[in-house]
Image (cartoon, rainbow, N blue to C red):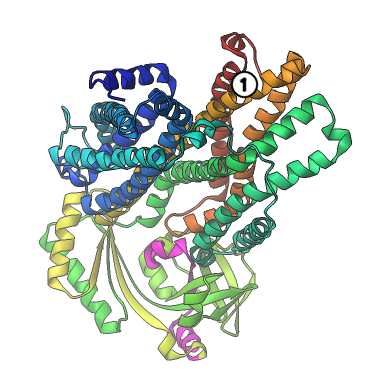
Amino acid sequence: MKVSHKLLPQMAFTAIKKNHKDFFSYIFVGAFSVLMNYILITLSFGGVLEQINVRNADIVALLIIFGEVIVALFSVIFVLYANKFVMRKRKKEMALYEVLGLSKRNISVILGIESFVTSSASIVLGVITGAVLNKLAVAFLCRLMKLPVPRGFIFSSGSLLGTVIFFVIVFMICFISNVCTLRFGKTTELLKSENLGEKEPKTKMVLLILGLITMGFGYCIALNAKNASDSLSFFFPSVFLVAIGTYCLFISGTILILKLLKNNKKFYYKPKNFVSVSNLMFRMKHNAVGLASICILSTAVIMLVTCTSALGLLGEYTLNNLFCNKIVVYKDPATAENFDEIFGMTNKVLDESGIKDAEVNSFMCTYVVSRNEDGNIVFCSTDEVMTNWDDLVLAYFITQDDYNKNFGDSVDLEPGQVLVSARKNNYEGGEKIVMYGKEFTVEKPLDDRLIKYIADPSEEILAANIVYVVRDEDVIKEISSAVGEEDCDKIAKVIVNGDSLTDEQCDDLCEKMRAASDCTVRNGHEQKEVFVSLHVGIFFVGVFLAAMFLVGVVMIVYYKQMSEGREDMKRYEILYNAGLTEKEAKASIKSQVLLMFFLPIGTAIVHMIVARTLLMYFFKVIIFVDESIFNAAFVISCIAFFALYALVYKITSSQYYENVYGKRALNHSL
């Protein structure tokens, strides 16, 4: 049949108008994906970081690029998922076009017009919204890094072109997929497409066993993590196994449970249970993957919100502990001559720069990589350190003369006595301790000043720093002999502080010290900037990923409620004719919708409870972690997500109810 070229566009626009809810949701998903990618591409490749003078812009850009790769991947998945939902309903409509005489080529033209309109609307809306929100994203980033917010909009033609090209390809893939569905699908099959999947599914025992094994192993790995080293080894294998187990158990386990309920005659042969169990069983054939996806994405959202909120709460705490000194000059390994050299060089540079009121502390100390075994400090080899960080201790030893010289004290230790400065271990005066087979008595515990001056605070993220003040060099020689001279390193260190020292003065002093000596010079101001850049980048990307996954959860829940409402409308019409009352139907709908609601979110929270300790240890690799603050962030994140998920459920269930009963359902509440 020959069709007028004016008729096909008219039919395409009529179809969009008729199915406006489906197409608008599809456009929303596409537009949201476009704006997320546009913002991240602009920030990472558009020169924005350089324009706003972000410190260590290369570090921040690298983290944003990593986030962009993940966002782009999930954007493709979400757009394809949304397209699949729209096409699932349109298959019957396409078949009817063919029955009425339109060729598959004509229908492909209609699909092409629809695809052009929806993709253009998504890209234009996404780019415009992204350009507006990009300003907010830049302002948010500047606020995190305490930089002035630039005026006006920041536009990058290259970022715009890259975003448009990427999504043109994505929407083209969707169009090709739709055309292939049409071209290779038989008309009779397309007409019956809405009724496919109605055979009672079978329990797939292989998947069930695989799910139990992978989930069990994943949980065991997470629960057996005891320290930060375990977290690095266990985190990703555990996540991978639990993800596989979740999909397998949702696909096979849900069907098994429903069949067991069906076999329970006392439970099954009641109107409410009969209808809900039957509906769920037939639906699970194509619904289980969606539920598992909701569960995995919900777990990811809770995890990201927990991490980003904990990072925000603990960032300042970590900053104050890591970079408490303005300038650190040291040589490792060192000799007495090295000590005199760097001490003299430091004072000379300070004098030449006219710095008179700086506080200078100098130490010559010995340190040993050790382990705390039930209160006994024992030597730990390099191989042990690489494989196990559990109870790792970096033990530093200085003489009482150095201690008295730097802190103006007058300690006079007896043989066998020590002073101890530690943050992660509690010591009491008079306590007996054993170090490398020799017994000592703690004369008194000290505050953490020695930790800040002598030890490297960054080491304490993974290990416990302990500084021991001993009587004299003879004690240090005894310890070196017990451990082995080759495993005891000496370090010469000079610390420069002062309230009046500005960041600019510290930068100038460090530059001069590096030029005057081959020793290592650490600028606390520079280290803070690197730390802030790294953690701001992680926090910023975490917020974007959490938002992306959250929209993914909302999208899948919405599409599930929409498609299931349409399917159930026909089922309930048949049941009404068979004598099912509206009250019984409502009770059935409520029970099955609540099950669909609680199953993914409940499983996600269980996943997070199991992973909490592993996640906390993983977090300790990058920052100081206060366990109570981390737990509070975890609980608040779970509650907040559950509340948001409940709101989504309330809104989407109203849509489901309307599909089943009509618009008057809006006056009812599930």
What is the crowding at mark 1: few (fewer than 14 residues within 10 Å), some, or many (at least 20)?
some
Q: Is residue 403 above or below residue 114?
A: below
Q: Residue furthest right?
A: 266
Q: Which residues are magenta?
A: 453-481
Q: Quadrant of residue 433?
A: bottom right
Task: Give how far across and how far down residue 413 sits, in percent.
Answer: 52, 75
Could one spot residue 534 in this view of the protein?
Answer: yes
Front-lying residue, 138 or 458: 138
Q: Is residue 644 above or below residue 665?
A: below
Residue occupied by mark 1: 569
Magenta span includes 461: yes
Residue type (three-letter) at the residue carrying disc 1: Met
Q: Residue furthest left?
A: 352
Could one spot residue 498 in this view of the protein?
Answer: no
Drawn side of residue 74 relative to residue 326, left or right: right
Q: Quadrant of the N terminus?
A: top left
Magenta span includes 110: no
Q: Quadrant of residue 257?
A: top right
